[in-house]
């Protein structure tokens, strides 16, 4: 695991860029603000462009553009009887730079609500606007039309617009209201005044116009969001269906931020957020005291965090929660002795993850720095979240040991989390069982040597084996104990007589072996005594012959006499040896 320098930790980055890069939730909020701003600007641009846009018409023959705008606000309306002829006058301003040839320009009717004598009318000559002295005057065009009041009483509206010779419309669409009243009425009813636009009405119209032009982009975005959520639901089988949509909203804009809690060896996910357990972050990770969390991103290792609050980035998932407390595990071992007797024994093991620095270990992270507000609350004695208080304390543990017990411990099944606590205890208590299997029941319960302690030897051997393996994994084995050896009740329940006969047969074999050993040992000792007596007799004979020869010869120089004396001494020695072979001890001195 690569070491991370202290300056790269999220809570040590104080620059704006560092804060955004190491705080994905702030980056998600920034994306949300950017998206809302984009929609707002799109609506504003659309509304401004649509409300202030006056169409123009480009004339290719004259190589100029016709442009105009309405000169004065129209009158409130006209009252007339059914079928009455109504003359209407229009005035428009000519935009600067517009084409100056207006002979081919016509005023064209744009709706059929109010009939007219003609569908198009010519535009009159240009005139100048009457303005006070010193102000620039604009060019005005005049157009007169004649319409006929409809046959039915009511309110009607007629609309007209300028059209160039090439058929293109330009300028504003000009409307006029017409009130048709009953012909039998002596006087026309008063024309209802149009309510003046209030500020509220203008703002509401502006907001509706903004929403109108931003709505297509918003609908497209919602559609993409909906389809992405459905894709995640189908891909991962998420339930309820809203989980996929919430996950997309969390990734894009941080709208929902679920939590993941790691405590001891348990991982708890937000029940309302099913995607967090399958896909992963973004989410808040709360690591309890004396706990470490192994985090993966995709299918690879990402990082290891200690107690406190951590933000899981996109697709980061908690692989395992590792308990840093001292563990005490009792396991019931069942095994067979060397002579085939089933027994049970309790094995107690005390161990914990090491705090020493291992090969490839990363330096410990500095404690989380509480912000100014939290430090003030802590100084005043006010409530500070327990996770923040815990993260602000120094925690020492080996991250390499946490990684090894997570990835080098066998799982109980596919998709099941690793349990290094139970796995290590079961494997190491198996060392005790292996030591027991090398001894007979009598050696365990009643050893021949009263000074020997087989239980102590077994525990010491198991402890040494456990410490060797634990040192490699980063586990410090503190102590190991073994309980009383008991016959296995489950195994003896159905085969009690068979095991009793086996035990008796094992004892009989053992005692017969011992008796045979004693018998052979006695025979060996008897044979050894005979051989020792024979060797001693031979030595005595040689000594007697030598001594007899010396005495016989003495100062006598007669060879005949010496030979006779030697022969007599040899005969006496043989008689002594023959008596010794019959069980009588030799008396060499008497012979001599």
Image: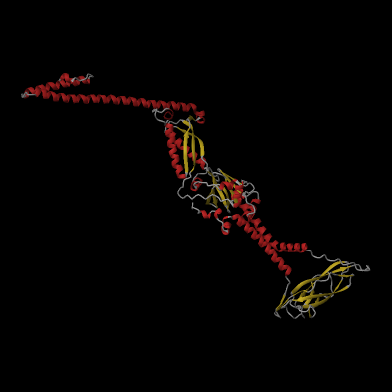
Q: Nearer the viewer, residue 253 or 384?
A: 384
Residue 237 in sight from this viewpoint: no
Residues 541 and 64: in front is 64
Residue placed at 11% from the left, 25% from the top? Answer: 550
Q: Is residue 394 left or right of residue 52?
A: left
Image point 43% across, 42% down: which residue?
468
Q: Position of residue 470 (x, y in %)?
A: 46, 42
Q: For this rendering, which residue is in front, 164 or 210?
A: 210
Vertical arrangement, residue 7 with respect to residue 474, above or below: below
Instruction: Please indicate whether residue 263 sits to the left or right of residue 159 in the image.
Output: left
In this figure, what is the number of numbered marks?
0
Is residue 352 something one can see in this rendering? yes
Of all residues, the one furthest to the left in this rendering is: 558
Where residue 436 appears, as percent x and y from the top left, is 44, 33
Q: Is residue 187 left or right of residue 493?
A: right
In the image, is residue 411 above or below residue 217? above
**178 in relation to 451, above or below:** below
Residue 196, image quadrant: bottom right
Q: Position of residue 406 (x, y in %)?
A: 51, 46
Q: Quadrant of residue 263?
A: top right
Q: How has the structure been colored for display?
A: secondary structure
Q: Is residue 6 left or right of residue 237?
A: left
**61 or 142, which is in the foreground?**
142
**Residue 109, position as x, y percentages in the image:** 80, 73
Residue at 41% in and 29% down:
443
Question: In which quadrant of the rendered image does the C terminus lie?
Answer: top left
């Amino acid at each position: 695991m690569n070491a991370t320098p202290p300056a790269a930790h999220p809570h040590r980055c104080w620059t704006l860029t560092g804060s955004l890069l190491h705080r994905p939730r702030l980056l998600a909020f920034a994306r949300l603000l950017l998206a809302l701003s984009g929609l707002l600007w799109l609506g504003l641009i659309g509304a401004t462009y649509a409300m202030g846009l006056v169409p123009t018409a480009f004339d290719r023959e004259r190589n100029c553009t016709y442009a105009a705008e309405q000169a004065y606000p129209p009158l409130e309306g006209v009252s007339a009887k059914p079928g009455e002829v109504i003359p209407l006058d229009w005035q428009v301003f000519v935009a600067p730079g517009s084409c100056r040839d207006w002979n081919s320009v016509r005023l064209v009717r744009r709706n059929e609500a109010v009939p007219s004598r003609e569908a198009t009318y010519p535009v009159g000559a240009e005139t100048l606007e009457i303005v006070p002295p010193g102000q620039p005057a604009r060019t005005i065009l005049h157009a007169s039309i004649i319409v006929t009041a409809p046959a039915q009483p009511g309110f009607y509206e007629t609309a007209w617009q300028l059209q160039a010779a090439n058929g293109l419309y330009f300028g504003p669409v000009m409307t006029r209201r017409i009130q048709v009243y009953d012909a039998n009425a002596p006087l026309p009813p008063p024309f209802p005044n149009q309510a003046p636009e209030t500020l509220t009405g203008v703002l509401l119209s502006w907001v509706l116009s903004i929403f109108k032009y931003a709505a297509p982009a918003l609908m497209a975005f919602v559609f993409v969001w909906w389809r992405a959520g459905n894709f995640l639901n189908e891909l991962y089988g998420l339930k309820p269906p809203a989980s996929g949509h919430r996950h997309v909203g969390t990734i894009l804009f941080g709208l929902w931020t679920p939590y993941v809690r790691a405590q001891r060896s348990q991982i708890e996910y937000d029940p309302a957020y099913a995607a967090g357990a399958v896909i992963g972050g973004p989410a808040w990770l709360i690591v309890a005291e004396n706990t470490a969390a192994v985090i993966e991103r995709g299918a690879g290792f990402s990082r290891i965090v200690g107690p406190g609050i951590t933000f899981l980035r996109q697709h980061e998932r908690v692989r395992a929660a590792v308990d840093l407390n001292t563990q005490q595990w009792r396991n019931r071992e069942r095994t067979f002795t060397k002579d085939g007797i089933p027994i049970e024994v309790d094995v107690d093991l005390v161990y914990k993850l090491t705090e020493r620095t291992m090969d490839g270990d990363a330096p410990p992270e500095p404690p989380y720095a509480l912000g100014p507000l939290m430090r003030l609350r802590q100084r005043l004695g006010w409530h500070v979240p327990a996770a923040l208080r815990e993260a602000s304390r120094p925690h020492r543990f080996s991250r390499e040991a946490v990684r090894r017990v997570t990835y080098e411990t066998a799982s109980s099944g596919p998709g099941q989390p690793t349990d290094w606590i139970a796995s290590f205890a079961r494997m190491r208590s198996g060392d005790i069982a292996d030591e027991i299997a090398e001894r007979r029941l009598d050696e365990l319960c009643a050893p021949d040597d009263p000074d020997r302690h087989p239980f102590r030897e077994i525990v010491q051997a198991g402890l040494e084996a456990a410490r060797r393996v634990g040192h490699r994994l980063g586990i410090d084995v503190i102590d190991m104990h073994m309980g009383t050896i008991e016959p296995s009740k489950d195994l003896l329940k159905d085969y009690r007589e068979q095991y009793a006969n086996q035990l008796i047969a094992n004892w009989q074999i053992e005692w017969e072996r011992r008796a045979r050993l004693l018998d052979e040992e006695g025979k060996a000792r008897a044979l050894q005594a005979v051989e020792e007596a024979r060797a001693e007799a031979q030595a005595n004979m040689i000594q007697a012959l030598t001594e007899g020869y010396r005495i016989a010869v003495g100062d006598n120089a007669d060879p005949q006499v010496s030979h006779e004396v030697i022969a007599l001494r040899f005969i006496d020695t043989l008689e002594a040896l023959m008596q010794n072979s019959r069980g009588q001890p030799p008396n060499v001195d008497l012979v001599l």
